[in-house]
Amino acid sequence: MISLLLSASFGFFLSFIALPQIIRYASKRNLFVQLDQRRIHKRVTPSMGGIAIFIGLVGTSLIFFQSESFASTATTTAVLAIPFLLGVLDDRMHLKPSRKILGQLIAASLVYFLLDIRISSLYGLFGTVMLPEWLSFAITVITIILVTNSFNLIDGIDGLAATFSITSLLFFGIWFAQAGVMHYAIISFALIGSVAAFLIKNWQPSKIFMGDTGSLVLGMTLSILAIAFLNLNGQLPEWHALKFNSGIGTALCVLITPLVDTVRVVIIRVSRGMSPLQADKRHIHHALVRIGKSHRFAVLLLFVIHFFFITNALLLKKFSDWYVIGTVIAFSVLFCIILDRLIARHRYSRKAHAPHLTFKEREAVKL
């Protein structure tokens, strides 16, 4: 436990001292997130805060590694350098979505072949079924890319992605520590400290954004931890204290809020004839701000919802995957229905007063 607290503290320290330097560098190089119609912040803000998060992760992981797991720790951080560099390029040059997906595909393939982290079975969902190699690879890569992009997409208002990440990392970090898999526990706590330091500068009004540099690293790290959790949890005997009978349902609970937001947005875009990769302001956090809630209220509300799902996983620890997954889906659909009704009510109210609005405000109503 002391090593985990030291990991979090050192990650916090490295990230905290790096952030002012990154803010100064970004300001000198004019590396700002510019205001446009799909953004809701009020002023230009430096990006690339994810550099500090990555520094905290790598520095801490390679200092507090366990001797028997040095190779695993070093290889994992090396693989995470790919989404990190991809994020740096995107924050600097605004890569096309297809190129970002290609980069993530390469990183996900390395996770499968180099780290040997893969979804090799259905973990009891349909009985004892081992997946053929090609299907295991496809499901693993799709899962990694989906989770990575869900955390990338949820990074839309101050403090949200950081808050979600800390909560999910805390669950995985404690579980892996209790299971004795210390290199994953140290990586989790190193990131908790790094992200906590970043959150101080990112809480509204934010002084810096993490950018894709940070969100892609966090998303891919959480996807790796989730798959590793599935594999190790699936190997535990039924009587083990750490065993979750619903491995898939538990992993889903830990990652659910960004995933629900991603699925919801993709469905809306496709139903309106838009590309699912086209950026807009239809995310859950955008919707909450648009109906009059503050950034802080939106973050705290979504954090409570995220925490509720994780608590749900703990309470339903001995229930089957079908029961937990069904519960998660039911609550997710209910939340989306309530949110969409609030949006519709707000839109109706705004339209009723449309004659008194400016052209720009009337256009905003259509969103």
Image (cartoon, helix red, strand yellow):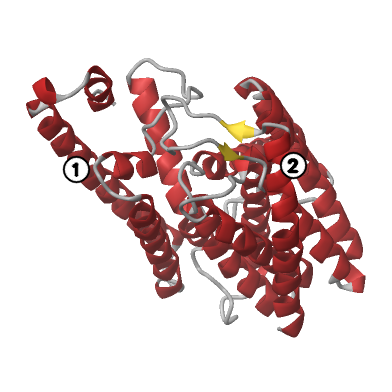
Q: Percent from the top left, x then y, of residue 141?
A: 66, 38
Foreground of the two, 297 or 336: 297
Name the element at disc 1: helix
Q: Is residue 177 above or below residue 166?
A: below
Q: Percent from the top left, x then y, of residue 177?
A: 69, 76
Quarter of the view holding residue 37: top left
Foreground of the two, 9 or 327: 9
CA neighbours of label 2 inside 10 A, class few (<14), some (14 to 19), many (20+)? few
The tally of labels here is 2
In-image side of 261 versus 335 (left or right): right
Residue type pointed to by label 1: Leu
Query: Contact, CB < 8 Å: mark 1 with mark 2?
Result: no
Query: Residue drawn 45% across and 72% down?
Result: 314
Residue type pointed to by label 2: Tyr
Q: Work out which residue is located at the far bottom of the displayed protein and give it.
A: 2
In-image side of 348 versus 272 (left or right): left
Name the element at disc 2: helix
| Mark sitting on residue 25 | 2
Q: Percent from the top left, x then y, of residue 359?
A: 23, 17
Measured in 3D between alpha carbons, the distance from the residue under mark 1 to the one under mark 2, in whole angstroms, is 42 Å
Is residue 105 visible from the viewing direction of this image? no
Quarter of the view holding residue 306: bottom left
Q: Is residue 96 above or below residue 287?
A: above
Is residue 318 visible from the viewing direction of this image? yes
Residue at mark 1: 342
